[in-house]
Amino acid sequence: MGQSTSFVGSPGGFRLRKDPSKISLHEIIEAAQGAISVAKCILDRCEYGRKNNCPISAEWRKLQDSIVNFLKQTTLQNILGSCR
């Protein structure tokens, strides 16, 4: 993933390479599963051949943009801090 480093042996485990406040949820999700998309047409993979005249494509784009913006603005530290 690039965000962590591992250590072997009995004291082994994982450690973050960056401060949690510098790691966004967007980075984590994209590293784990690839590009974030609510619909294939958002990634230019429309299965219906109607990408340019799809009646809901613009609405999917708005939702996509909102989700990506939220994930980019939310850091691992935000999540960790809310667990306390």
Image: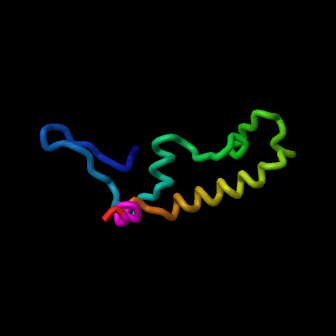
| Front-most of residues 62 and 45 | 62
Q: Is 2 placed left or right of 59 in the picture?
A: left
Which image quarter holds the C terminus? bottom left
Rendered location of residue 28, percent (x, y): 45, 50
Q: Between 1 and 33, which is closer to the camera in this rendering? A: 33
Q: Residue at x 73, y 42 (%)?
A: 41
Left or right: residue 70 versus residue 48 is left
Measuring 58% from the left and 56% from the top, which residue is drawn there?
68
Rendering coords of residue 38 (x, y %): 64, 46
Residue 48: image quadrant is top right
Majority secondary structure of magenta residues: helix
Label count reads: 0
Q: Give x and y (percent) for residue 18.
A: 34, 58
Q: Is residue 58 left or right of residue 17?
A: right
On screen, residue 43 versus residue 56, left or right, reads left
Q: Quadrant of the N terminus?
A: top left
Q: Residue furthest right?
A: 53
| For residue 33, above or below residue 78 | above
Looking at the picture, how far across and down is residue 62, in whole percent? 70, 58
How is the structure coloured here? rainbow
Q: Residue at x 37, y 50 (%)?
A: 3
Asked if 40 appears above or below 65 in the picture, the reply is above
Q: Residue at x 65, y 53 (%)?
A: 64
Q: Is residue 23 magenta?
A: no
Considering only vertical position in the picture, is 77 above or below 48? below
The part of the chain drawn in magenta is: 77-82
Examine the image and state in which quarter residue 45 appears: top right
